[in-house]
Image: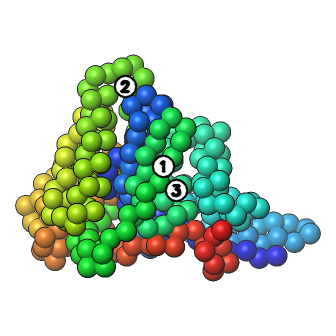
Amino acid sequence: MIKIAKAPVRIDFGGGTLDVYPIPSKIGGAVLNVAINKYVRGKLIADKDKTILSYRADVPTSSGLGTSAAMNLVWISLISKTKDRIKLAENVYGLERVLGVVGGKQDQYAATLGGINFFEFKKDKVYITKINLKKKIMEDLERNLLLCYMGKPRLSSDVNGLVMNNFNRGNKKTVNSLKNIKAVTYEMKKTLLKGDLMKFGFLFNEEWKNRKKLHRLITTTKIDKLVKLGLKNGAVGAKLCGAAGGGSILYYCNNKNKLRKKLKREKIINFKFDFDGLKVNGKNFG
């Protein structure tokens, strides 16, 4: 028997970390993200004597794009009998908790569902709003985004663990920053649905300003320099993807070519949006 599967990674516009327990139980969480056409691919070869499972990924793990969760989703999909996307995403999340990974649910859901999604996390419930945009708005959004891989990743579980320590101690700065990130994420959703992409891109700065307050290790000197470089050379907004502390910078641009030239020494990840999510044996899952 041979089975193949592929799952997309994602970029998060706003709300990362708000999906990490116990934040949803105490203040509620919200995440706005989109799946992109960078994939984790897996193959299962099984016969009576042995089983071989192999992977390959288009982007590095710890890139801030949910690669690890997409990888787990692929291998669970290859051995699972369920055809329910939500159940599969929850199974992957449960596995990661057993393994001691400090993380949330946005990566698993994004990889399973594909497209642009707004997730609300309330206690143990996940409420999903599929974001459908007019074709022109969708094309403009996709065209004006630029993704830069930092090359010095930090494990998201490590960063999340540090933030959770502050949150669980009731650190006011951390709690207030998370509440502000949540408010910005709701505003992002509202602005995106209105088609006001310039304001949407500017909100990246608000998300990032509050995210940096979560812990001193969220940012680095190089990250700060690249964010400033972007804002001076064609970007209206910039933020880190994932838990931050390394990984990838997402820019929203009004002059993408200018910024691309300024970042010629950095690794640019070219992408399109993915609207299919998980596929097994070439077919949409489910």
Kindly check if marks 2 and 3 are in contact, taking CB atoms under 8 A apart as contact. Answer: no
Q: Residues within 10 Å of mark 1 (few under 14, many from 20)?
A: few
Disc 2 versus disc 1: distance between alpha carbons? 26 Å
Residue 129 vs residue 143: left or right? right
245 is higher (above) or lower (below) than 57:
above
149 is higher (above) or lower (below) than 281:
above
Query: What amino acid does circle 3 point to?
Result: Tyr
Q: Earlier in the sequence, mark 1 or mark 3?
A: 3
Query: Outermost residue toward the left?
Result: 232
What is the secondary structure assignment of the residue under circle 1? strand
Where residue 169 appears, x then y in whole percent? 39, 19
21 is higher (above) or lower (below) than 172:
below
- Residue 195 or 42: which is nearer the viewer? 195
Q: Earlier in the sequence, mark 2 or mark 3?
A: 3
- In this figure, which residue is indicated by the disc labeled 3? 109
- In this figure, which residue is indicated by the disc labeled 2? 166
- In this figure, which residue is indicated by the disc labeled 1? 127
Q: Quadrant of residue 23?
A: top left
- Residue 2 or 189: which is nearer the viewer? 189
